[in-house]
Image (cartoon, rainbow, N blue to C red):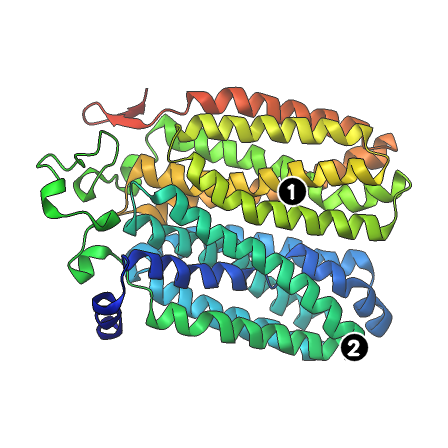
Amino acid sequence: MLSLAHKLQRILPFYYGWVVVGAAGTAVFARMAPNITTLTIFILPLSAQFGWSRTLISGSVSAGALAALVLSPAVGWCIDRFGARPVLVVSVLVLGMAMTSMAWATVPLTFYIAFASARVVFHTSAPIGASTVSARWFIKKRGRAIGIVFLWGAIGGLVFTMLSAQMIEHFSMKTAWIVIGLVVFGVSVAPSLLLVVERPEDMGLLPDNEEPSDVVEDGESSAGVGENRENDSWTFAEAIKTKAFWMLFFAGMAMFCVNTGTNVHIGAYYLDQGLTLTVAAVAISIGWFVSACGSVVWGWVLERIEPRRAYSIVFMILCVSTVYLLTVDSTAGALVSAILIGSVSSGSNVIIAIMYANYFGRNSLGRIRGVSETGVLLGQATGPLLAGILFDSRGSYSVVFLLFGGIALAGSLIVLRARPPVRTGPLFTAL
């Protein structure tokens, strides 16, 4: 496969790392096939055709989260052991087969197996693999590189949601599943297999296309402190001994507890507030559009300010957006809310990927991210359940949004203390 990459490197007028970013981004595009907004389109047709309850259908999302929770550390280990390219290739193949097979999933068990398999790729191997390989090619321009990766994901969310609706409306639900699977195969398999190269060093290059003279002997770029090279990477065992790792772990849990918990219930809340399904759909679309633009913007921002400060800003936006929902009772309010939520979604994805890469280096990034992702998954599992319990006991979402706003506010203050870890001897701490 490297022969093709070498040929492209010789003829392309730009750094090959951008090809890797684009190729890895196709896997993040494909991962959005089993996104929650895609499943939302299928709920009514599945209920009508098979008589399944909405609780049964939505339970497939929880099944996928539990499977991903168990498999995430193993996925991270595989990325470090075998490389991101084979993990991405296997992932998109599994994803394409899972989405296609749902055309013949006529009983709950087969539906759960197929959709949960797809959600494992959604949660773990695609985003971790793509962001890890991109982080290995860039240091100074890591922000914009990972921003572009998640831009692909936001576009995928829009495409698969719209594609599902059009296929079901004009053809059939079975056709929709098959077409989604074929799009996954067509968009992501070849780029992941043929264009992704693990590291710039495999092609005689350096991160950011630097010249050897730009790298000083102690492993740092002459551009400044903090742009660490290979010999400054932390092992997994070293990383988990730092305060920084665990602060990022629990920050991710808090971020996605609030964000996912709000997003799962926001449609029902809009209806309770007297808004229509059309308004809810438009708000979701606006949110995806903002997320797409925001991925690139946050990447640019992260090359100019400390990631922990940007993370604090995202938490503050999350706090404002959650509390603001208490006032939403109009179309305009729903659209403002969508803009805020889209900003949070793009910012959280990009910032988390960059912080782990900047703090712990490139060598063991897959395993570190694989374990840290379990915190995100725990948050995603806890948030919707907590919101549902509080709504059932209180009869409204007021307490939910106030509690979530408080969690986000606390997160914005705590994450400021997540400074980059430093070596202080046999044990490691984050100052």
Q: Residue at x 20, y 68 (%)?
A: 10
The quadrant in which the N terminus is found is: bottom left
Could you tell whether 325 is left or right of 394 in the image? Answer: left
Residue 353: give x, y in percent of width and height: 42, 43
**Residue nearest the observer in this picture, 227 or 427:** 227
**Residue nearest the observer in this picture, 7 or 12:** 12
Give the label on residue 358, or none: none
The tally of labels here is 2
Residue at disc 1, secondary structure: helix
Disc 2 marks which residue?
A: 170
Disc 1 marks which residue?
A: 260
**Is disc 2 surrounded by few (<14), some (14 to 19) or many (20+) residues within 10 Å?**
few
- In the displayed structure, 38 sits above or below 294; it is below
Occupied quadrant, residue 172? bottom right
**Residue nearest the observer in this picture, 284 or 91:** 284
Could you tell whether 401 is left or right of 14 in the image? Answer: right
Mark 1 vs 2: CB contact within 8 A: no
**Disc 1 or 2, which lies upstream in sequence?**
2
State whether residue 416 appears in this view: yes
Give the residue type at disc 1.
Thr
Q: Residue at x 78, y 33 (%)?
A: 390
- In the displayed structure, 51 sits above or below 251; it is below
Residue 216: give x, y in percent of width and height: 10, 37
Q: Residue at x 47, y 25 (%)?
A: 415
Residue 85: give x, y in percent of width and height: 34, 64
- In the displayed structure, 216 sits above or below 419; it is below
- Extreme residue toward the right, this view: 274
The quadrant in which the C terminus is found is: top left
Residue at disc 2, secondary structure: helix
